[in-house]
Image: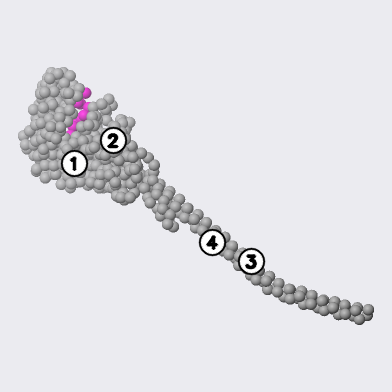
Amino acid sequence: MNSKKHSLFLSGILFGVILTIGILFALISYVPNQTEARTISTEIISADSTNTQSKAATSTEEQNTSIAQTKISKSSATKSAIKSWSSETVYVAGDRVIYKNNIYEAKWWTQNEIPSKEDTWGVWKYIKKVSSSSTNTNGNESTNSNTSNTSKNTTTSGSTNTSTQDKTTTTTKKKHPNNFKVVAYYPSWVTNGLNKLRFNTITHVNYSFAIPTSDGGLRPLENPSLAKQIIKKAHANNAKVLIAIGGWSYNGTPLEATFKSATSTKAKRTKFVNSILKLVDKYGFDGVDMDWEHPRVDDSSKKQYEAVMVTLSKKLHAKGKLLSSAVLSGATPDGQIYYDAAAHTDKVLKAVDWINVMAYDGGDGARHSSYQFAVNSGNYWRKTRKMPAKKVVLGVPFYGRPSWASYETILQTDKNAYKKDIATIYGMEAYYNGMPTIRKKTKYAINHFGGVMIWEITQDTTIKKYSLLTAIQQAINASK
C-alpha cells in the first residue's frame, strides 16, 4: 500500500514536470508568433494608410485638375463668347466680333459696317486671326484645353452660321464701285427732311453745323436729337456721319472773323481742337468736316488753319475718325485760279481724308454751277494741286441762282424743271442743275475723282423719278 502510494506520488510529480515544460514551451512558441503578427498587422495598417494617403492625393490631384479645367473652361467660354459679326447688331467701343476667320474690335459705336483689315481708319480694329482649330459651328472662337492628360473642348452652343456669314458678305458689300463717295450735307435747322436721306446712294452725311466761338469753343449743337436720329439711321445703313464745323455765317454774321479769333493763339487752337473732339465723342460722330469759309493767303489765318487741321487730323485719326474739308472751287467759271485756294496748304491737303469742292456759287445766272465750272474746279485740285483722285469730291448744288430756291421748289413751279437747267421762279430766271446735268457731272466725277458732294440734301424732291439723288444713282449704275 505504501509502496503503491509512493509510485503514484512520483508519477504525479513527473506528470506535473512534463505538463509544466509543455506549458513553458507553448508560451515560448506563442510570443514570437505574436510579435510577427504585430509586425504583419503594422505593415497592413501602414499599407492601408499609404493607400488611403495615395487615394487622398489622387483625389486632391483630380480636384485640382477639375478646378484647373474649370478655370480654363471659363476662360475658353469667355473667348467663345465672341460672336460672328452681324449687320443687324449694334456694337460699341471694345466689342469684339469674328468676321471671315479674323477677330476685330470696335473703336466706337457702329452698326452694319463690315470689318476689314485694309480699312485702318475705319471703325474696326484688326486684332488677330482665329486659329484653324478654334472656330465652332456658330462662327465663334473655341479653345481646346489639356490638363493632366485630360482634354476639354469648350464651345458656345448655337446654330450653324456659315451660310449667314456668306450671305452677309454678299448683301453688305460697298455701295459703289471704287468706294465712290456720295456726301450729303444735312442742315441742322431742317427737322422734317429725314425721308430724303436715301442710304442706298448716300455714303456720308455732314451734319451742319457746329458753330465756333471766338474764344476757341463751340456753341451747343442745334437739334441734337435730330443729329442722333441721323447717326442711328446712317449707321444702320452702312453710312457715316460727320459733324461740319462753321459754314458761311451764323445768324446773318459771317464766321470768317470768328474762326480767325478762335485760332489766334496756341492755347485757343488747343481749346478749339479739344472742343471739337469732345463733341464728336459725345454724339458718336464718325469724323469732322471743317467748313472754314475761308482762310486767306495774305494774313495769319492761313497758318492758323493749317495748325488746326494738322493737329485735328492726328487726333481724329488716332481715334479712327475721318477728317474732310469744304474748300473753294479753286477755279472760276472762266478757268481762272482763285488766289485764296492756296490757303489750303499742301500740309492741310495731306492731313485730310478728302476735300469737298464747292463747285457752285460762281455767281448768279449761268456762272452759278455749269458743267464746265465743275470740270475747272475739280481739275484745279486734281491736276494743279496734285491731289489723289480719291481725295477730290466734286460738289453739286440742289438749288438755283438767282432766287436761292431749292430744286424741290423749282420743280413744284415748273413740272418740266427736272430735264433742264433754267426755270422761271419768283419772277426771275433761275439757273440750277437738272437731272441731265447732275448725271453728267457725276459721270465726270466717277471717271476723274473720288465722289460727289451735295449742298444740300433736303432741297431735293421726294418724287424719286425726278430726284437729283436718283440722277446721281443712275450715273453710278451706268458706270458699273
Residue 354: give its label.
Answer: 1
Q: Report crowding for label 4: few under 14, some 14 to 19, many 20 or more residues within 10 A (C-alpha).
A: few
Q: Indicate whether residue 33 is drawn in magenta.
A: no
Q: Is residue 400 above or below residue 146?
A: above
Secondary element under disc 2, as helix, strand or loop, is helix
Secondary element under disc 3, as helix, strand or loop, is helix
Q: Are marks 1 and 3 in contact (CB under 8 Å)?
A: no
Residue depicted at x 12% and y 26%: 434
Quadrant showing the C terminus = top left
Which residues lie in the magenta part?
453-462
The residue identified by callout 3 is: 41
Could you tell me the amino acid type at mark 1?
Trp
Residue 197: give its label.
Answer: none
Could you tell me the amino acid type at mark 3?
Ser
Could you tell me the amino acid type at mark 4?
Ser
> Going from the N terminus, do you reach mark 2 or mark 4 first?
4
Q: Report crowding for label 1: few under 14, some 14 to 19, many 20 or more residues within 10 A (C-alpha).
A: many
> Going from the N terminus, do you reach mark 3 or mark 2 first?
3
Residue 235: give its label.
Answer: 2
